[in-house]
Amino acid sequence: MTQRLMEAWVETPLEQMNVAVIGTGHVGLITCVSMAAIGHSVRGMDIDEAKIAKLNLGISPFHEPGVEDLLRKSIEQGRLSFTSDPGEALGDADAIFICVGTPARANGEANLIAVEQAARDVARYTKSGTIVIEKSTVPAGTARRVEWVLKHERVDLAAELLVVSNPEFLREGSAMRDALYPDRILVGAESSQAFTRMRRLYGPILERGAELIETDIATAELAKHACNAFLAMKISYINGIARLCELADADVVDVARVMGSDPRIGPHFLSAGLGYGGFCFPKDLIAFERLSVQLGYDFPLLSAVARINDDAIDNTVRKIRDALWNLEDKRVALLGLAFKPDTDDVRFSPALTLASRLLDEGAVVVGYDPQAATDAKAELPDLLIEHDPYDAVRDAHCIVLCTEWAEFQSLDLDRVRELVAYPVVVDGRNAFEPDRVTSAGLHYYPTGRPDMPAHALESVHA
């Protein structure tokens, strides 16, 4: 994949711009690499000097398919470098992306202190005429605050700095492709000059057919939160339908297929399971709810989405408890710990929330994940970790599939049956073929589908 991504851009003509990126987290690093891949000269900036040292060696701080190879190629080509010095990063920049974190405060509101600090750095170090691009997911009205900081920190420059909103729409696990081949590029600005500069910045990507949507700044800021909240709503909706299916002996997979065939609904984000996780959806949903309250609008649907998402974990715990009777001292093996496949991100991971609940009820919980094991252990020290899926399921009283990594499809289920203490599989993602599981002598407990007893218990050891 990396070779195809890079080869697509090496011959692209470009009027090169000097691009600075403040923040080298997931969004910031993807922005650095994608801007360099299309031909710009890019400097990434971060206060974490240890991270900067590794980035300059071509070492990514997280797992994301394709990013590390493209990172190294861009460094070798002289298009990308990293620094902890804001003066070095921002001094000659034509465009500056603000990609810092916006974690939730205790009350759910987005913490924008890093955005403010980034704006202060821009005001202190940047040159006249630079375009300042708000990339972090922020509440509507944040760009006005950034402009306020620029105006008061640098009165002489503020009128010549162009502030725009350019939200990211990256999916962890396919972020590199999303950055280079996006469905759409959203730009919110208040001047024709700003729109012109952004078209120049994204020129090669736009020439390859990406849709450009231009709005005012507030609309762009709000649209990002609206998108994430709507996708979270679809996930919670199908999980609510899954609960109804279990009570009515219906099949949520077929219900989702019927729904998804309607072009007004579409098939995406209609997979029932443990619910959504990751850093974006939980944080952005509550921040959006807090924004609506601040603006004077009661938006109860948003709190219902979060409540139904929490209930997906509750339902899985009930399912495990029903299968095992008592959880004390039972060994439960979790296959997958990242919040989704093809990433090592365990922030707000449903698997870790489930693990914590099981530990609280006295179970012994062991996990396996091809990428996220180290971070999962750091997040939840009482979680036991195995580095092979068969070691993880050995002597388990219940196996729970939490993350639909592709490698789990090739598990030897006959071998699994020989290793486990109890033949119980709870599929938190409906990733297994039911007949394949039951034919191996394993009881199958899917999500939103009828439970299926093992077909071949008499032919295997108890």
Image (cartoon, rainbow, N blue to C red):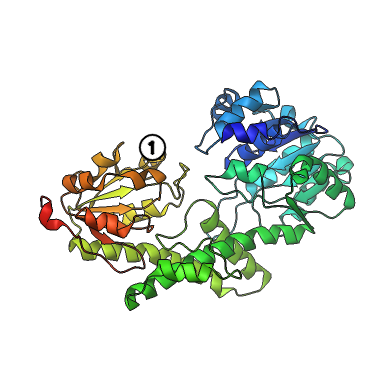
Image quarter for residue 248? bottom left
In the rendered image, residue 308, in percent from the top left (x then y), is placed at: 44, 68
Residue nearest the observer in this picture, 235 or 153: 235
Residue nearest the observer in this picture, 135 or 87: 135
- Look at mark 1 in the image and give the residue it sits on: 374
Image quarter for residue 44? top right
Camera sees residue 47: no
In the rendered image, residue 328, in percent from the top left (x then y), is placed at: 18, 56
Residue located 49% across and 64% down the image? 270
Residue located 52% across and 51% down the image? 279
The local crowd at label 1, few if under 14, some if 14 to 19, many if 20 or more residues have their Cα within 10 Å, is few
Is 35 located above or below residue 186 in the figure?
above
Is 83 located above or below residue 238 in the figure?
above
Is 40 located above or below residue 430 in the figure?
above
Residue nearest the observer in this picture, 59 or 375: 59
Residue located 55% across and 25% down the image? 54
- Helix or strand or loop: what does disc 1 sit on? helix
Q: Is residue 361 left or right of residue 244?
A: left
Q: Is residue 4 left or right of residue 455?
A: right
- Give, as a three-letter code, the residue at label 1: Thr
In the rendered image, residue 8, in percent from the top left (x then y), is placed at: 68, 35
Camera sees residue 25: yes
Residue located 40% across and 59% down the image? 274
In the rendered image, residue 289, in percent from the top left (x then y), is placed at: 58, 66
